[in-house]
Image (spheres, helix red, strand yellow):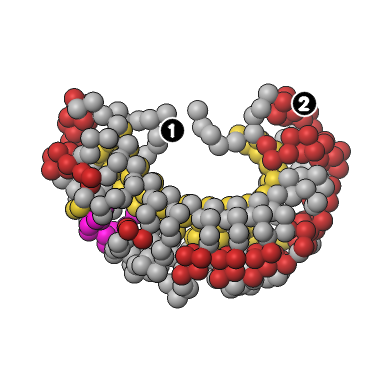
Amino acid sequence: MSTFPARINDPEPAAMPEIRKRLEVGESLIVQFSGAFYTSAQLQQIDELCATYGERLNVRFFGHYKSTFDANVVRSIPRVVSLNLDCLVNAENVHAIADLPRLQHLALDILDLQNPDVLRFEGLRSLRSLAVGDTRSARIDLGPIAECTFLESLRISGQTHGLDALAELPELRDLTLRSIPKRASLGFVCRIAKLTSLGIVLGGRDNIDEIVHPTLRALELVRIRGLSDVGDLTRFPALATFQVEDQIRIKTIGFPEGCACTSLRLLNCKTLSSLQGLERLPLRELRVYGTSLDADSLIPTLPSTLEICAIYTGKEREDRRIRQILDQKGYREFGASTAL
């Protein structure tokens, strides 16, 4: 079963009792509006649900392609805890988000955003999670994020102005940096005291050698243009989960003595042909797809701790052969929460 909340798109007023029932039994939901299909009475009902069910109800406004989204609508749901204003081209009165006293989770993705200082509002300082999307022209000032001292999870896409301010966040544990250009240093990551999970997606850089972190447990590197080497993994002594995806230049990955990695995913790394030190990892899960690794040479080096193993080449006949070998050795293909 998926762990992602179900989405209810442009619900009719008659659907509100069913939404309440689903929340009552413990389900988390996203109620989303793609256009101005909401009435004041309906928003009042949603506000009442927000007051009762808090962060289990995410209210999302997206699309609105036939008009400029008027963010004043959020004043009708003052008790909202989790709010998405995303996949929007134009918006006005965005400052209205500052008047939501219970807001803890916010996603803001407006292509033609005209408020580069949108994060300065004092009303946002209680946020626990924040996602900031790319913009066409105005560079959002990330500096005010330093005042969000409760922030635990942060996703930034394309924004670099004031990026160093992220180092001042005392409770930040989960950080995703998307589409960050090569010219922007990521050295500030080293100073995020409680960071445990880091994702770097898209953008470009030759290496990530400037990042060193003692508490980082999960690292994800996806489609970073120019990346040819993950470097010395002793920089991350607590690393347990490591995923490298869509990296066409990485040819080898070395795992040093004492590396704590228990989950490894190597996906669509076409030139990857060598894993050094794999046999000494305390691995529980290994998933490999679309690499130049030779399965027959790889299998004998699998660590004794391994329980879940899947190796795919993209060739049906060869994949069946490899699966048969893995099955004979007692490796499961999937775990309770495993997906490729």
Of 102 and 311, the residue lying toward us: 102
Q: In this orientation, does residue 10 appear?
A: no
**Residue located 30% across and 61% down the image:** 232
- Specify few, some or many for label 1: CA neighbours under 10 Å numbering under 14, 14-19, or 20 or more: few
Q: In this orientation, does residue 298 appear?
A: yes
Task: Please say whether residue 254 is one of the residues in the magenta stretch.
Answer: yes
Q: Amino acid at mark 1?
A: Ser
Q: Main secondary structure of the magenta part?
A: loop
Q: Which residue is mark 2?
A: 17
- Specify few, some or many for label 2: CA neighbours under 10 Å numbering under 14, 14-19, or 20 or more: few
- The vertical placement of 296 against 238, above or below, is above
Q: Amino acid at mark 2?
A: Pro
Quadrant placement of the C terminus: top left
Task: Please say whether residue 65 is one of the residues in the magenta stretch.
Answer: no
Give coordinates of residue 289: x percent, y percent: 28, 44
- The vertical placement of 143 against 337, above or below, is below
Q: Which residues are magenta?
A: 246-255
**Residue located 36% across and 67% down the image:** 209
Give coordinates of residue 180: x percent, y percent: 48, 67
- For marks 1 and 2, the one nearer the N-term is 2
- The vertical placement of 66 against 14, above or below, is below
Of 337 and 303, the residue lying toward us: 303
Q: Is residue 287 left or right of residue 117?
A: left
Between circles 1 and 2, the one closer to the viewer is 1
Separation of residues labelled 1 and 2 (CA atoms): 32 Å
Q: Residue furthest bottom?
A: 183
Q: Secondary structure at mark 2?
A: helix
**Residue located 53% across and 34% down the image:** 3
Tag on residue 63?
none
Q: Which residue is mark 1?
A: 337
Number of callouts in the render?
2
